[in-house]
Image (tube, rainbow, N blue to C red):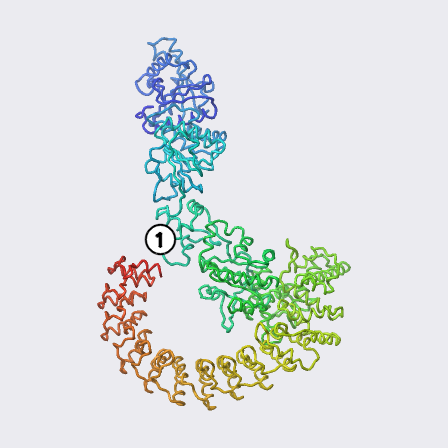
Amino acid sequence: MDQNDSGREGSSYQIKLLALIALEGLNHDGNWKEFTEYNDAGDFNDIVYLSENKNSSFAIQCKHKRDKKKTKISKNDLVKKGDFYLPKYFKSFQEMKNKWKKFDEMIFVICSNCCPDTRTVSETEEKISIPLFPGETSSYKLKDLVVKEILNSYDDQLVTNFCEKLRFFHITDSQIDESMKGSLTDAEGNLKLKFDENHFIRNIDNWYIGKNRTTIVKSHVIAFLYEWTSHKKLTELESLGIYFKEKYIIGNNQILNIITAEESILTILKAYRSFLEDYNTNQILFIDPEDKIEIIDRIIECYELPRFCILLISSSGFGENSETCYNHINNILEEFSYKKVIIFSKESIQTHLSKRNITTIFDKVNFDHLRETSQKTLLSKSVCFQGTDIPLYKLIYRGTNLSIDELMNDRSNLSYLMDQKTIVELIFERKIEIGTAINENSGDIPVYYRERRITNYVGEDFEEQDVRDFVEQSDKIFLISNEAGMGKTTFLKKLGYLIKKKYPHLFVLRIDLNQFTGLFETHKNKGIELEEILGIFNQNLLKNSFEKSIFSMNDEIVLLVDAVDEMSPTYTKLVKKFLLSSSKRKNISKIFITTRPHLKTELESFLNTKSYQLCPYWFLEQVVFLGEYWKNNLNINDVDDENKCNMYAQKLMSKLIKAIGTTDAWKFTGIPLHIEMIGEIFLESDKKQNNWISCKDFLISGYDNPELPIKLTLNDLYDMFMQKKSKIFIDEKCLAKGNTATKLLFESQFENALIKHQKEAAKLLFKDSHFELMNISKIVENIPIETIVKMGIIHELEDGLVFIHKTFAEYFVAKALWKQLIELKYSQEFLVFLLSIVFLDEQYEGIRNFFEGILTEEFDEIPEEILCICDSIVDSITWNETTNIHILAREGRLNILKIMLGKRVKRKQLLGIIDYSSGSTILKEGIVYPEIITLLLDKGADVNQRDEWARTIIHYAGIHRKMEVLKLCVDRGADINQIDIYGCSVALYAARENHVELVKFCMENGADMNQKDMYGRDAIELVAERGNVELVQLSVDRGFAINPKVIYHAASLGKLELMQLCMQTSKVDMNQRDESGTTIIFQAAQGGGEKLVKFCLENGADINQSNTDGSTVLLNAAERGDLGLMKFLLENGADLNQSDHRGRTVTHYAAATGHLEMLKFCVGRGTDINQKDKNGKTTILYAAGCEKLEVMRFCIENGADIHHCENEGRSLIHFAAASGNLMMMKFCLEIGANINQRDNDGKTAIIYRRCN
């Protein structure tokens, strides 16, 4: 078809028909050739298709009409010179007869989107003789009369032959498009590969318009199709937008061999970018290393086409066909000297292409090779860091507020961090996941969880949010020590989530040491590193060099270590070594550790830290907890039912706390495990059996008030919980309801199951030799595991049976020990084990807790003979600094102590031991339990015995604010004026605690209030430090002298009454300075302002007197922005132009702290805004650091020199940059500051900005 026939649409029609016929030939024909614009075909030259199959060859002239009105080909069109002029086609037919060997087998076609007029043609009834045309094509023959009329001057036989071989085909554009889809689908099925229709047609189009157009054969069509796989991948590479600083240069050789140790798409991408400068995408072919050998062969065939100049290929895909591939490539290069091949390999390919000159390059692309724009692109992409999407640059430059442009100034570690695999994953936007996701809704934290508080060793309380922010403190280790059931594990999980939420750049790792007993067993004789634990804990962590690099970055890991106390004592030393080793690692920023109290002192000493404690839930928190627990478990959505739930919870907790009867009963019910057990116990139950109504029954009862139990202790709570489990086991899980005989059977089975629980608990907690001392070890039970699991106290895991909480194991063991003792089924060895190990070993604190609860109710039931035997066993034990009964006093085990101290009147030797690990006396250990102090004193403990710090029991009574203990000990002869190694008496400690009643008691009982500690402070000064005027006055009234330092404390606290008291009772020099060189009037200005300053002046203070650093009251007022005091001082003679020892004036101080009104006042009174301090700094340079633009503007408006540099060459822009305030920097640039100005060390503002 001529280009001017129907223009672009006509060409498109012809090209699509070419493509369709080529596809159909591929799908249905054997060997064939396809031509276009073939000279020997005359006017049938648009498409020539020659097939080896008989009657399958044809020559076509394509005629496409854009004029929609022209829909018919009339007789007139055939006789008039034009597109359908019949004589010209007959002439071409005549010429071809003598030229074409296959002439007799050929069909000659005029193909158009216009239909011939039926008066001129007749539609053929036979099927189209050209099978490659779609079935929708209409085929027509010219009527003989019409032909003979038009060609009446030609040979009749030849005209008849022409009439037989000529066809008019009518096929529209839409019919071609529809047929193309079907043909392409068939090709995809035959070749087992997906292709793109538009790309295939573009390839046909390129061939059609090519200058050196060749014949299309079947292999070319296959190549055109397969080239789509290359084009698609090159298009993907192009769309990545990644560019390199340098490019590969091939030189004069046709082959470039790039050798890389790590074969990477990065090298291919760099090569592709290198050749895009001289070639376009349509001239480049790419074979993916992962392509199958069939695809590789086809694309190499495609490379034979003249338009392709560059072939990018990886030798790793050749496999066993490497020689064939290399030979094929070599042949193509021989034929086309302009073609070039880039082969990526891990070793040289010279041996495969030995006859050719090859340019060889050894290369490994890294992050430094990328252009800065591409580096920024990658650094701006997000990675999934522990479940949170975070820009990569914020992960690498953790905690920074700098923009990515500023960070690009420091790229020193990027190549080290960014390995090739990571770069590729970022380029292709594959999800990079680092670490396990930390999600509040992961199921680890129950929905009824309430926020927790913790307290430190001095009694300060912290909310969860405060604990989260401990990561910003300088301390590295935070130890949380609590008894069992306090929710340490859940708190640690919540803490991890809170830290991660606020500090997404931190690597938060939580480790439950319970999971690694096997690892600790294999490492008993060597240390364990964090990576070894993580390798077991999370197989997906540290799996590549990038994650390892992120993991190893300094100060970026927060480690949460749980269950330190639950490891076997065999591993305690190894666990401590692991914790200490972790604390010394540079990549670990903070470590939070949970443990039980028995390891607290040991870990505090070993790790050089102080511990925190989780606080129990307050009463209202308990009520809310229960309400949410029941709401969740009963699926309550009704508001009235919610209110009834909350009311039930409030009444229940009030009743239980009252029933327990102690002032701190709320602490018992506020233990998370206890409150959750209460929630389960009272969720639903049988009122007839329990004499109380459950929450579920209360909601449907219509009662105004629930019936509730009378009392509850720890043991009661666990007993009730077991009763609940018993009912569920018997009535529900064993389906025994309503059948008395069956129920009795299952009740017996339940009792046997409890014995099994006791046995499993003893196995868990005791070593084998101790387990064998218990009677339950000899009981043989045949209880199925399913029955045990049904009770819901034990879970079955791969490693065996596990209690849902360790306290249940301790509960069962305490029950078993008591039963064996009270039933007189003990041996001498059993009693020794009970008294010397269970009662004294730190790891059995939980067992003692339950055993003490049993003794509280049952102590009087212990037979006399047992107490006597216990006496003799205690006598036989060698007691010393490491073996003693201090732990029982510390834990408050009154009844166990009664057993240990026995019937004997005095046990002075046993009670006089100083414990080795704590350095404490036994009285000190029992300081919080007055009843234990009474017992110990009754049994011969020395009330004046000193511990390692020379403290007696009454020192600790002052420290711990224990009035009852202090009175008891003084009544028993304690010396109230004894001092410890720090020079402190009980009065000093009571004063430090600011405990009025304790201090009064000390004074009333002869305490010396002027006794000084090692720092020279007496009790009066300590109470003055805390602003307690009452106690100072009381001391004066009793004749004690006031320390000169007291007036400083009074001034700093703003206590005018206390200052007046000091002046009345002693001669005070108002112009004296304290140890730090500070004057009284200076302290008064800070603590109480104008009122106290006036008092100082009235009593002789010098208004212009300076501290040792040169600061004065006036300068301090300027610094604090206290305009009222400033005016008062000036009215009373203060010098407005005074300066400190560094030359700083009031304007410097006001500007530095951003107090605009103060600055205006001072400048208004005549101060010089350009006055320099001794370092050459002016007011505006100080203002640059205060981050307040209005202060800066005021300085400029009042004549400040914006170009001034201080002595070290730093200008306004340097100080603004150092402040970290971008708005301040922008303002400086707007007023003409030079961003590139350097100080005396050559540093620009950007350096100061980055350092900040």
The residue pinned by badge 1 equals 408
Instruction: Name which quarter of the figure residue 744 lies in.
Output: bottom right
In the picture, the quarter occupied by the C terminus is bottom left
**Residue 172 seen in this snapshot:** no
Question: For this view, does 1075 lie left or right of residue 973?
Answer: left
Task: Return the x and y of residue 234 as percentages of the image width and height.
Answer: 40, 38
Instruction: Name which quarter of the figure residue 147 lies in.
Output: top left
Q: Residue furthest right?
A: 741
Compared with residue 236, is residue 871 higher up or lower down, i.e. above or below?
Answer: below
Instruction: Name which quarter of the figure residue 350 lies in.
Output: top left
Question: For this view, does 517 lie left or right of residue 592?
Answer: right
Q: Nearer the viewer, residue 1198 or 1110?
A: 1110
Compared with residue 377, is residue 1082 higher up or lower down, i.e. above or below?
Answer: below
**Residue 486 seen in this snapshot:** yes
Mark 1: few, some, or many residues within 10 Å (few <14, many ≥20)?
Answer: some
Q: Nearer the viewer, residue 1155 or 1034?
A: 1034
Determine whether the residue tagged by mark 1 lies in a helix, strand or loop: loop
Kind of residue sitting beneath label 1: Met
Task: Return the x and y of residue 715 as percentages of the image width and height.
Answer: 66, 69
Task: Return the x and y of residue 907 as percentages of the image width and height.
Answer: 66, 80
Count of number-bearing discs? 1
Q: Nearer the viewer, residue 831 or 637?
A: 831
Question: For this view, does 1215 lie left or right of residue 330?
Answer: left
Compared with residue 1206, is residue 515 higher up or lower down, i.e. above or below?
Answer: above
Q: Nearer the viewer, residue 841 or 109?
A: 841
Task: Return the x and y of residue 619 as percentages of the image width and height.
Answer: 56, 71
